Image (cartoon, grey):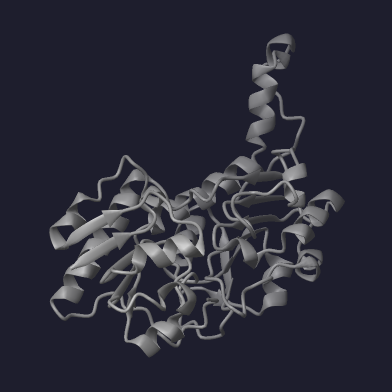
Amino acid sequence: MKIVMLERSSVGPDVSVDCIKELGELTIYQNTVTTDEIKERVREADIVIANKSPLNEETLGEASNVKLICELATGYDNCDLSYCRSRGITVTNVVDYSTAMVAQHTFTLALVLSQKLFYYDDYVKSGKYSAQDRFSNFEVPFYEMDGKVWGIAGMGNIGRRVAKIAESFGCKIIFHSITGKSTCTDYEQVDKDTLLRESDYLSLHCPLSELSRGFINADALKKMKKTAILINVARGAVVDNGALYEALEEGEIQAAGLDVLEKEPLEPSNPLSMLKDSSRLIITPHLAWASVEARTRCVEGVYQNIQAFLRGEKRNVVNPDSCLFR
């Protein structure tokens, strides 16, 4: 069985992938970017392990042996599921491996922004604190989470974990189901306008789909509280980056914490790259999922998916009728 891993670097050199060698003849590429690279590297493969590399008719058309695609991630918007179904190619992903870390990062961003920690850390390190004659400084106001409304878009595994943590901070939880199909009854489900209007903190945990692309746009941002903090740890295109820049510049919302962007890595042409004030905007480089523990679980998940496939069992098989963008 010939196994090709197209993006070894996506899990980092500190996490071993040696377990996958037990399952077949493994060829590893640190990164695969161009269409021509993908076509050539998967040509003889039986199993393809990928993360962001586009897998579609153009890249897989000459790879007649491919039977299984394993996403080294939860998302699979790089994969044309309709084409794979027409070819009889099984597509699997790894679920719930990063839930704990993404939830943790959500609150890291929210707390740093809401408590103005960058400002006060700089205040101390700049020498201003040492030069003052009183024990404290709180000239930039900050507020408690207790009693605030935490809104969530996307009440899956991560959304539920975030809701539970927010509850422990004393927040009231509301959520909006973008598909309208959520069966969650633990928290109050609201329409989009209510979510935008009432949330003091709004965190996004939805997959990218035709329904969620541009979910937070200029119109949505105008409906939010001026004191609201927006957190996006979902997919970059769920938020219109240009509209968010304008909203932050105009003071339409208080602040935003982003781990994902419309195009990654951050391009100089993205207007958010011009906003250097970390009290209003924090951007991390798509790392919310990437603790050592989470990356280790991700590799183990791929290993188990291949193992199950070779036994003729279905494990984490992606629904071919998914509405995710391809």
Closer-to-camera residue (155/137): 155
Residue at (50% x, 59% y) in the render:
167
Residue 291 on image: x %, y % = 38, 46
Closer-to-camera residue (47/145): 47
Closer-to-camera residue (165/307): 307
Q: Is residue 218 left or right of residue 99?
A: right
Residue at (69% x, 38% y) in the render:
278
Image height of 132 relative to 37, above or below: above
| Residue 6 picture quarter | bottom left
Residue 183 on image: x %, y % = 46, 83
Image height of 287 relative to 188, above or below: above
Q: Is residue 225 left or right of residue 35?
A: right
Residue at (20% x, 75% y) in the render:
309
Residue 148 on image: x %, y % = 63, 57
Q: How many marks?
A: 0
Quadrant assignment for the N terminus: bottom left
Q: Is residue 217 left or right of residue 86?
A: right
Residue 94 visible in the displayed image: no
Residue 118 on image: x %, y % = 65, 32
Residue at (49% x, 57% y) in the render:
33
Residue 90 visible in the displayed image: yes
| Residue 14 picture quarter | top left
